[in-house]
Image (tube, rainbow, N blue to C red):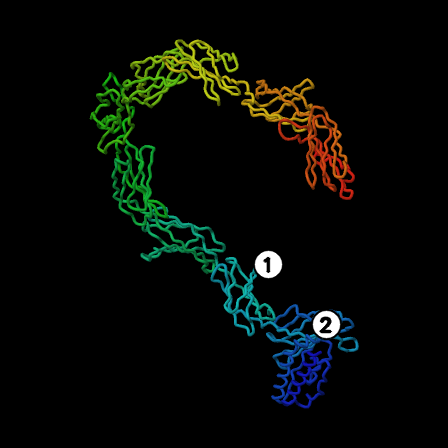
Amino acid sequence: MLCRTHFTMVLVTAWQAVLQQGGGPNLMQPPLVPGSKPTVTALLQNIPDHSRDQPQLIPMRRLEQSSDKMRSAKSKSLIFIGLLFNCLEMIFSANTGFSMSVYNVTSQSIYLRWPKFSGASSYRVTATAVNTVGHSLLACFSDVTLKGTLTSLIPNTIYAIQAEAIDKNGIILAETQIMQSTAPDIPVIDKAYSKLSNSITVEWRAVPGATSYLLTAQDGDSFIETVVTNSPGTLTGLKPATLYRVTIRSINSGGKSQPSPFRKAKTVLAAPILSVSSPSCDSIAVSWKAVYMAAGFSVSLMRSDGLGRMLKENTTNTSLIFTNLDPGTLYTIKAYAWNVNGIPGDDFTYNQRTSPNAPADVQVAFNSGTLRAIVSWMPTEGALTYSVTASSGLLKLKCNTSSASCMVPSLQCSSEYYVSVTAYNDAGSSNPTDAVSLKTIPCAPVNISIEEDEPGHLLVSWSSVNFGHYYVVFVKSDDGLEVHCNTSHTQCHFQSDCGFTYFISVFAYNKAGQSPLGDVLNYSTAPCCPSDFRAVLVASDTVEVTWAPVRGAEMYETRALGGNGVVRCNDTATACTLSALPCNTRYSIAVYSFSEARGSNTSCASKYVATAPCSPEIKSISKEALSVISVHWQSNNEEATYIVTARGEAGLWHCTSSGNSCTLIHLPCGSAFSVSAIARSPAGQSLPSYSVPLETAPCCPNDLILTQVTQSVTNISWSVGMGAQTYVTTLESPKGQAKCHTLQNYCLLGCITCGTSYTVSLKAISETGLTSSCTYQGYSSSACCPSGVKLYRLGNNGIRVYWRASDETINYNTDLHGSKGNFTCTPSSGLSHCDITEIPCGDVYTVVVSPVTDKGPNLTFCPKKIYSVTCSGSSVGMVIYRGKSNAEQRI
């Protein structure tokens, strides 16, 4: 409402300003009332001679006023109205829900659509040019028409368009307003032509208000479009030799104009695609495929450096050849096709070089050391690379280069080659030059053989070699001395020495030089026998053999002959160990030098060596006495002495015999031994026999202590017996036996009778079950504790302790313990009571009666009873039994 009121006030103010600027009497109308609907129709009522009542589209007459001032005021008012149409559209559309939209625009037409409005029987549309005075249109439509077209508009002009929904009584139900510009005017094509086969260029005069232009080229049903900003414009992507209909449309922010009248334009011919080659050094051949709509072709050729004249040929064929050209020269070829009207099409340019001439002045130099040839020549015009070919029969060797010389590698010896050179460029190759002959050095001699026809004489022979004029044989010994032999034959003789290796090489020679190095053979003469030969027995079945090295020996073979066969040892060292020899055997041992070429020298002297005696085999071990063991064995050795050893943690014990048994004495108890035997003879000492385990019975414990724990339980403990794993202890009397078996060195024995004498025995048992029986001093259990212990009051402050004695011959001791004091009494022998005088009353006493022993303190395991001694005044009152002590109850 605020926007509408503000707009109305502005509109009234603007209108009054128009009136003040000279409006005539016909323009005087009542002012707008704030709050009413200002419409375009109402505003236009101030302009005379307008017809608004016809039901069809009616062009409104331009206002004619005699006064220029009035016309100027009218124009300004209309411009102001147009600038405010956006606010009007916002106000009325928002209030009514009625709207209008544009779906197409051309230079002189605007296409509109609107929704059906409830209650409307017709629709009225008014368009007013904002920037042109007096140009307005009005159109009426029935209620079934929801689309409309405004025509005969001014191009490139902004229009204020108002739509009104009117009921059958002519009342305006709703209205809406929009601003829309028409498209620019239709351009006119001045020229349309083709310079390239894929494009057409269009020229036209600029249209006011156009921001860009749409060019269209149509060929039947297909067309191509492009947008440009100004003239001239070019359509690309077209087909060659094709007739197109070309149109243009102008564009601005409002839309596109109608297409212009078309112009016909045809694209030029496509360029021929050339295929170019140089079949010879002075010609170039050009060919191409046929071009659509072409009547003929024009092909021109000239040097790319601009020298010489241009050659040009016109033809209707698709190939031609240019001749008498310069070899190795780059030419530029240009070709195009023309149609029946002689109009040329696109051209095609190609650069082609003629093939080069053959090189001149070919020279060949041979390098005998590397079997390579250096070939050189004079460069030829236009050649980019050169190829050298060296042919020998079916073998061809090639070398490629961009310079004027080349090295041909990998030539074969004893061969004749024919060398030629060919020049190349991107056009092709020249003819090869005349061949130049080249003979190489001879090959190295083969089938070399060496024979020692008699000791000290060597014969070297070989096969003859092609192109070999004479031969030189070099013989070098391994001490550095070298001799040689020159001959035109195929053999030579040399002197040789024993134990040397000779290296022999043979060379062939001719004018080209020396043959390559061939096979280098070596020949070794037979080695001599080793010197300073020694054979020593280092173990019972092992002989170590040593000697000094000799010249020519690559390996040594040691042979030991004896027993039932031969033992061999091969080594490159000057020592050998013969092991695992049979015992008690005599061997003949010799060392022979050996080389792979000559084999063994078997003329060397031998030595005799005997192996050690055989190991004895222990057959049995027997126990003769407590610490005496007898060992028996078996052996077939002669002149041997046997030593038996018992080895253990306790030490070593030995016995010696030349027979088959001996005795070991003073072996300690509880010990484990490993018993073995060896044999000794002048040849050496045998390996030990297999060990036999030996275990002596465990030792008896040295100390044994018995302690009575309770009246019927005794604890017995002892020191550890060497070799013992478990122990069995026994207390035995006529009244019974107590026994325990334990891994420990102590034991509790129950069911002991008090006041009884026992015999004490112990068995120490080893892990393997060996047993030692041990006897110790006898043991007597303590006297029995009395029973029926009771407490009685005596007189004023006295207490009597009474009991039943187990034996009248036993003396007893009585102990009372309380918080106010401890009391003891010992009665005379044979009595079973004891009196304590002057004992404090009002206390709790623990009472114990135990036999008196001659071994020390009283027994501690007799029962303890608790009594309360009350007071009667200052004297002892009642004596009350409280039960046994907690310690005794726990026992």
- Residue lying furthest front: 795
Mark 2–mark 1 Cα distance, whole angstroms, equals 42 Å
Q: In the rendered structure, are the residues bearing label 2 and label 1 in contact, judged by CB atoms less than 8 Å apart?
A: no
Does residue 863 show up?
A: yes
> Please, what secondary structure does the residue beneath circle 2 have?
loop
**Image disc number at residue 170:** none
Quarter the C terminus occupies: top right
Seen from the viewer's position, the closer of residues 547 and 840 is 840
> Please, what secondary structure does the residue beneath circle 1 have?
loop
Residue 494 as seen in the image, left or right of residue 426: left
The image shows residue 850, relative to residue 124, as above or below, that is above
The image shows residue 872, relative to residue 215, as above or below, that is above
Task: Say which quarter of the image contains residue 799.
Answer: top right
Seen from the viewer's position, the closer of residues 466 and 823 is 823
Q: Position of residue 204 (x, y in %)?
A: 52, 70
Q: Give whichever of discs 2 and 1 has the lower sequence position.
A: 2
Using a 10 Å C-alpha cutoff, classify the residue at mark 1 as few (fewer than 14 neighbours), some (14 to 19) or many (20 or more). Answer: few
What residue do we see at 77% from left, 78% from top?
Answer: 171
Give amino acid for label 2: Phe
Give amino acid for label 1: Asp
Q: Position of residue 422 (x, y in %)?
A: 32, 43
The residue wearing badge 2 is 98
Seen from the viewer's position, the closer of residues 124 and 775 is 775
The residue wearing badge 1 is 221
What residue do we see at 47% from left, 62% from top?
Answer: 195
Q: Position of residue 321 (x, y in %)?
A: 38, 50
Does residue 526 show up?
A: no
